[in-house]
Image (cartoon, rainbow, N blue to C red):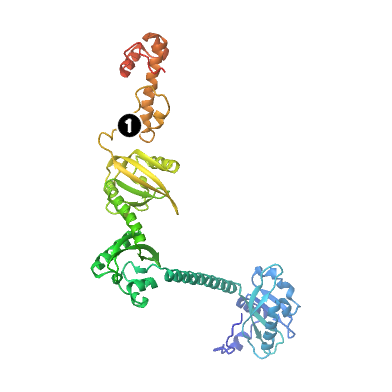
Amino acid sequence: MDKPVSRDVYRSFRNSADFFSELDGEAVDAVATASSDIALVISPTGRVVDVSYRDKDYKPWGLDHWIGRPWSDTVTVESREKVEELLLESQTSPLTRTRQLNHGRQGGRDLPVGYRIVSFRGRENKLALGTDMRGLAEMQQRLVRAQIEMEKDYRKIRDVESRYRILFQLAYEPLLVVDSQSLKIVDANEGAARLLSRPVKKIVGASASIAFSRQDQALALETLSDISRRRREETFKIRAATLDEAMSVRVTPFREFGKTNLLVCFLAGDRAGAGLSVVSSLLTIARNLPDAMVVTDDDGKILDVNSAFLDLVRVVSPDRLEGKPLDNWLGGSAVDLQVLMANLREHGTVRRFSSIMRDDLGGSETVEVSATRIQGERGSVFGFSIRETMRNDAMAPTLPTGSPTTAAQFTDLVGRVPLKDLVRDTADIIEKLCIEAALKLTDNNRASAADMLGLSRQSLYIKLRRYGITEPDVDHGED
């Protein structure tokens, strides 16, 4: 890299003769070494007479072997012409400008050095002072790489913008992009221009209210603000500015440049309107059902809830629930939701699953959950219907009192009965069966039965009264 500098010194030492006349060769060597990374003594014919360097890291470039060789032989091919120019310039100037020369290294990177030649009056040899420019070269390379990456990113952005403009303008449906804060129109396509009978230039920058009839403008702006606050896609019916009949309008919030904008799509046509009307009716019914409704993703995180769910968990706004795990409120522990979702993944639906619902105020309610799984484009979505059980339904389930015939009588209660109660009641059933079996084997001889069971007679009598075993010849549990 060439770096032109002024050849004239703005101010030099006024008494240089008095001070420097006493300096010997060692002092000059110290000055040259201190002021440069590499210093070369160059003969009138351009050969390297001597070398000085202050860092052992330069040894791989073989500086010690430069002595006696032409200076141009120590540099790469593209730098040889610069060597000749420097030597030629040094014949007419005591101090040359800085020129970058690259010293080659076999199997390694080049060593870039910026040299200036100093000529001494009355001396044939000249001094080449070199500065290591590897740091500057590395910075230049990083800058070039950064510029290349910026060019690639800029090209990608331009391509994306072009595709956006093409799709946006070629879309048949009227489309508006609305700023969610100011509710002003940021962009509009030709379909919107046809619908509103205005050119795009006059639509952009205006309030979104111009797209709707005067009677519905206040309602439209309020609805757009509400959708922006909830940040979820919604569809509603309203009259456009140039039409007398209501049409369906789908509003989709999206993020752009760190803020939320709204994509407003006017859906024309009876067929589209009828389909959306059915969907809107279903959504309206779900939101107004008295049973709590909640939708989660595959990880059990809440995506949407209705008003009944908010009342059940004592939360004012759905914003406080979105993205939170459902097991923060559903289940006596996290196991309940895991069991529920495992069954949903395996069977697709679950009915009348008994659990507990906790609210943010520390209360709890016994509930019954029905759920289903829906496979969408972005993965599975789970919908839950949660109903509070009546007082008589809220009784904790108990184990069968008779002799169990299968393990299903116990496993069906997992998740509905605490484990300690399940183990305790199961132990009571086994103990009763053992006592009945001992009485049968001993022909109802209670003393022999107590001895067989390892119990005292008094303990056996207590257990008989506890389990209600009073009939000596009752046949318990035989097929």
Crowd band around label 1 with a 10 angstrom C-alpha radius: few (<14), some (14–19), many (20+) = few
Q: Which residue is mark 1?
A: 397
Say left or right for 403 vs 140. left
- Using the rendered view, name the quadrant where residue 235 is placed: bottom left
Q: Is residue 352 left or right of residue 24?
A: left
Q: Nearer the viewer, residue 285 or 226?
A: 285
Screen quadrant of the C terminus: top left
Residue 260 lies, in percent from the top left, at 36, 65
Farthest-out residue, left: 215
Residue 186 image-quadrant placement:
bottom left
The residue that appears at 35% across and 11% down in the rendered structure is 473
The amino acid beneath tag 1 is: Pro
Tell me: 75 left or right of 308.
right
Q: Is residue 166 above or below residue 117?
A: above
Q: Is residue 289 left or right of residue 25?
A: left
Quadrant showing the N terminus: bottom right
Foreground pick, 263 / 279? 279
Q: Position of residue 17 (x, y in %)?
A: 61, 88
Q: Position of residue 341 (x, y in %)?
A: 41, 43
Q: Is residue 468 above or below residue 259?
A: above
Q: Nearer the viewer, residue 452 or 308?
A: 308
Q: Is residue 405 above or below residue 94?
A: above
Residue 381: x, y in percent?
Answer: 41, 49
**Hey, which residue is sitting farthest bottom in the picture?**
92
Figure disc tally: 1
Q: Answer yes or no: is residue 231 visible.
A: no
- Residue displayed at 35% across by 35% down: 416
